[in-house]
Amino acid sequence: MTTIKVNGTDASLDGVPVHTTVLDWLRDRGLTGAKEGCAEGECGACSVLVARPGIDTPTQWTAINACLLPAASLDGQEIITSEGLGKSTELHPVQQEMAVRGGSQCGFCTPGFVCSMAAEYYRADRTPSASCEHEHGPNGFDLHALSGNLCRCTGYRPIRDAAYALGDPAADDTLAARRSSPPPPPVATRLTVDGAEFIRPATLAEVLEILTECPEARIVAGSTDAGVEVNIRGLRPPLVVAVDRLAELREFTWHPQPGEAYGLSKVDEPGQPDGLGEVGRASGPGEVRIGAALTLSEIERLLAGRVPLLAQVFPQFASRLIRNGATIGGNLGTGSPIGDTPPALLALDASLVLTSTRGERTVALADYFTGYRQTLKAPDELIRSIVVPLPLAPMTAFHKIAKRRFDDISSVAIGYAVEVVDGVVRQARIGLGGVAATPLRARATEDALIGQPWTEQSVREAAGVLAGEGTPMDDHRASSAYRSAMLGQSLLRFFAQHLAAEGVSA
C-alpha cells in the first residue's frame, strides 16, 4: 500500500493516476489551502512542508512547490499543509503574526506564504542578531525563504513585518520536537494506473537496469522541469523513474590537495539512509565531488561558502522553493542553454561522472553539451556526480542578467575564474549561458587574457573579444545586441570588482 502521512494521518495513494501532482492530490482530499497560481513553481501559492534530512537536526521542515511534484514521489513521506499548522481557534505563531500585522488581504497566496515562513521559523540555526542586514531580520529570519512566494494585493511590507516578529518555537511545539527524529527513509515504490507507471527503485543498479531496458523512461528528481511539462504541456510519459533519494547519487566529498586536512561529508551514511553524515579528515586528490541528486539548497549548506563562485549562484537560482527541490544533476541533465549552474561550473573546470550498466566514465563539462538540449550522455546513462577540481581560482564571480533580481531566467549568465600572479593573468576560465544553443567556454576571451597584464587596457581589449563570443539571438528576454553588450560590460565589471587583486599570487 502506498501512503503519505499528511498532517499526522496516513492517506492512501492507491489508484491515484501517476501524473497527479501533490497539489491536486491534496485538494482532492479537501485540503484546499494550497492553491494553483501558475503551475510552474513561480508563485508559491502551492507551498507545503516536507520532512527532509537536515544538517543541524536529523529532520528539517522543507518548503516545496506541491504543484510540480508527483504525489507518488512522496510515498512513505511526511508532509504538513497550512491546515496542519494551526486551527482557526488556535493559530500557529506564523499564522498569528500574519493575521495581526495585516499580512493577508484576498488570502489566495497566504497559505503558501505561511508554509514557506514556517520552514524558516523552524530552521534550527536561525538565531537573533543585533545587527540585521537588509534581507535578514533581528530574529535571524532570512527573507530569501520567501523569494518564491508572490503576492499581488497585500504588499510585502506587512508580510516582512510578520516574518521579523517571529520568536523561537515554544517548548511544547510538536513540529519543532519532530526535528530531533530522522525523516522517513525513502520507500521503494511501484505504482501502475491506467497504463502509466511510476517507479522509485531502491538502488542505483536497479535504475540502470531499467534504463537499459527502457531508455525512453522519464527520469525525475525534484521534478522542477518535468512538472512544468506535465502541467503546461500536458506531457504524460508512460514510465516515470524517481532518483532523488538514491544514496549513490547523494554523496558529497571534499578533498583538498594531498597532505592537507579536509572536510568529508557524506549525505547518506550506513544506518541513516537519508541523513547528513559526519565530518572527517584525511588526504587525497584535490576535488569537490557533488552527488547529482543533491538539491541546490543542500549543496549550498554543505559547501557553506567554500566555493565562492557557487555561493554567488545559489541566491540567484530561481527561488528557495525551487532550490529545495531542484537537483544539480537535473539542471545539467536538461541540457538547457540558459541554466544557471553550467556557466559557473564551466568556469570551475568541472567534469561529470556518467554511469550505466556498462560502467562509469568521466567527461569534461566543456565537452558535455553537443547541441540545443543535446549532450554526450547516452539514453541509458545517468549523471552520478559533478567533480570540481581544487585548488580554486582566487578571483571568481557570477553575473546574471535578467529582468528580475530573483526568481527569473537568465538573459545572459557569465561565470569567471581568474588567477593573476605578479600582475599578469596566469589562468582564465569564463563560462557563458544564454548566448548560444549550448552553455560554452569563452575560449577566445580566455586566450586574450592569459599572459596579459591585469590592467584596464588589456581587459578592455578582452571585453571586445567577449562581446563577440557565442551566437546570441533575439527573443522575448533580450535582443542579440543587448546580450553582446552585456558580455563586454560584464568583463569590465569583473575587473572593477577585482582591482585590488592585481599582484595576487596563487
Image (cartoon, rainbow, N blue to C red):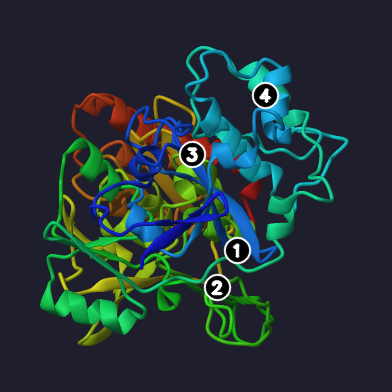
Label 2 with label 1: CB-CB less than 8 Å: yes
The residue sitting at 22% across, 28% down in the picture is: 480
Q: Secondary structure at mark 1?
A: helix
The answer to whether residue 27 is above or below residue 53 is above
Checking the image for residue 98, the label placed there is 4
- Look at discs 3 and 1 and give the one toward the viewer: 3
The residue sitting at 42% across, 37% down in the picture is: 30
Q: What's the residue type where badge 1 is placed?
A: Leu
Q: How far apart are the alpha carbons under marks 2 and 4?
A: 35 Å
Sequence order check: which comes first, mark 2 or mark 3?
3
Number of other residues with Cα within 10 Å of mark 4, as a class: few under 14, some 14 to 19, many 20 or more: many
Q: Quadrant of the C terminus?
A: bottom right
Residue 193 in picture, x, y percent from top left:
18, 59
The residue sitting at 49% across, 29% down in the picture is: 405
Label 2 with label 3: CB-CB less than 8 Å: no
Question: As rendered, which of 438 and 24 lies closer to the eye?
Answer: 24
Please indicate, yes or no, whether residue 499 appears anywhere in the rendered image: no
Sequence order check: which comes first, mark 2 or mark 1?
2
Q: What's the residue type where badge 3 is placed?
A: Ser
Q: Secondary structure at mark 3?
A: strand
- Look at discs 2 and 1 and give the one toward the viewer: 2
The answer to whether residue 39 is above or below residue 305 is above
Q: How far apart are the alpha carbons under marks 2 and 3?
A: 25 Å
Q: Using the rendered view, name the quadrant where residue 180 is placed.
A: bottom right
Number of other residues with Cα within 10 Å of mark 2, as a class: few under 14, some 14 to 19, many 20 or more: many
Residue 398 in picture, x, y percent from top left:
48, 45
* Residue at mark 1: 302
Q: How far apart are the alpha carbons under marks 2 and 1?
A: 9 Å
Q: What's the residue type where badge 2 is placed?
A: Val
- Look at discs 2 and 4 and give the one toward the viewer: 4
Checking the image for residue 267, the label placed there is 2
Q: What's the residue type where badge 4 is placed?
A: Met
